[in-house]
Image: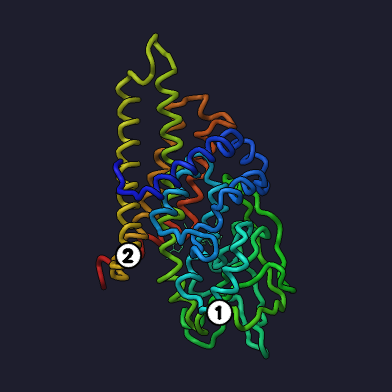
Amino acid sequence: MFLHLSPQQRELQARVRSLVSEKVAPQAAELEAREAFPHSVYEAFRDAGLFKLSLPEAYGGIEADATTLCLVIEEISKASAGTALLVFPTQAVIRTIREVGSVAQKKRFFQDLSTGDKLAGFCLTEPNYGSDAGSIQTRAVLEGDSYVVNGTKAYITLGPHAYYYLVFVRTGPGKRTGGISALIVPRETEGLSFGRKERKMGLGDSVTSEMIFHNARVPRENLLRAEGEGWRILSRHSNPMRVWGAASLALGIAEGAYEAALDFARKRIQFKKKIASFQAVRFMLADMKMSIEAAKSLIYRTAALIDSGEGAFRDVETLVSMCKCYASDMAMEVTIDAVQICGGAGYLKGAPVERLMRDAKAVQIFDGSNQIQRMVVSKNIILD
Ligand SMILES: Cc1cc2nc3c(=O)[nH]c(=O)nc-3n(C[C@H](O)[C@H](O)[C@H](O)COP(=O)(O)OP(=O)(O)OC[C@H]3O[C@@H](n4cnc5c(N)ncnc54)[C@H](O)[C@@H]3O)c2cc1C
């Protein structure tokens, strides 16, 4: 698909593509099977400056826009969605601070993150509140100059490997979403600990764990905007991450699986012919490519709208939810078909298509399940 990209975006895309083919793709299956933090990829991405892409230039970043982040996450996810999750939450947190942080907060947090070796985690989900995020119960009570935080967050990507966490808490006494606030919490906070590393169906190369707050004291100056502003920060400033986060991740997964299936179909001989010569297989490949291109158009059109700053909130919200939902449903279908095309070889552990199929399932669930995205889209189009 033709994309209008700047020379800088094309250069970065090419650089990430070659980094991924050299440092990620050859060990992607092994890293996923190991179910541990992918240290070697972390180091390669750190050295390439990928963790500070969204920082302003004064702090060593390129103030990456949504389109640029889509390109990066898509390229990494073609080979390994789990390692793209080193970049995705980190950029989500930096972008949120960039948009809503005070001058003093930006100075402090961006100075710390400018070394380029620090990751950031995004913490909303709790054991009893996933889709119903507006009901979260982790409490933060102001005592003197600190918020005292108690509660548990669940499924936190990066687990204990981040340096800062953007944590949504209830400061109350406001109504449901009106009582939610956003705090930046350093990992070294006393009273903050991490539960066991979760074992997952896929994304073994991404650490996911519980995060437990027991009388954890967080400086008052780490509150973003004001008390009760958390839901607005989430919906207006954090949620657009779904385009360059979950949606681009799903797009990359689908492209990786499609390429593997195409390659297999061109080489595999049955009935003395390449299986790519059979119409049933050709049409599957055509359908896969069509839906990939459709998702790509939707994602990059939405990213361009976000970057223009001209989209009305409801239009952006609708398109963002469409991107996340459509791309991840598409990735699930494409990866299932890719396994089918590869036959028994696709079903073996270690085959790229089986790994990508397991990874695709997660994207239908996280970052707001696809049922919740359909609720957003229907609410915004029916307007009842
Ligand atoms: C690999 C992975 C990484 C994650 N990383 C993070 C992270 O870094 N930070 C973070 O905060 N969270 C993270 N999550 C959590 C993720 O965002 C939640 O799992 C997701 O929002 C769904 O919440 P839940 O699992 O509690 O499911 P539930 O909310 O319990 O939903 C269960 C099912 O019911 C459906 N459902 C719920 N309500 C409705 C409704 N009103 N109408 C129709 N259907 C409904 C859901 O769609 C789902 O199919 C991660 C999850 C995974 C799997």
Q: Identify the residue shown where x is 29% and y is 66%.
A: 315
Whole-Å distance between the Cαs marked 2 and 1?
29 Å
Query: Marks 2 and 1: CB-CB under 8 Å?
Result: no
Q: Secondary structure at mark 1?
A: helix
**Is residue 383 rendered to the left or right of residue 95?**
left
Please, which residue is most extreme toward the front here?
A: 58
Corner quadrant of residue 128: bottom right
Q: Earlier in the sequence, mark 2 or mark 1?
A: 1
Camera-side residue: 2 or 79?
A: 2
Q: Secondary structure at mark 2?
A: helix
Q: Count residues near mark 2 (Cα–Cα under 10 Å), then give few for <14, some for 14-19, many for 20+.
A: many
Give the image location of residue 168, x and y in percent: 55, 73
**Is residue 255 rendered to the left or right of residue 277?**
right
Note whether 41 is above or below 239 in the view shown.
above
Instruction: Say which residue label 1 marks.
Output: 104
Please, which residue is most extreme toward the bottom here?
A: 144
Instruction: Say which residue label 2 marks.
Output: 316
Note whether 67 is above or below 223 in the view shown.
above
Q: Amino acid at mark 1?
A: Ala
Note whether 112 is above or below 243 in the view shown.
below
Q: Amino acid at mark 2?
A: Val
Give the image location of residue 254, x and y in percent: 42, 40
Q: Count residues near mark 1 (Cα–Cα under 10 Å), then give few for <14, some for 14-19, many for 20+.
A: few
Note whether 38 is above or below 375 in the view shown.
above
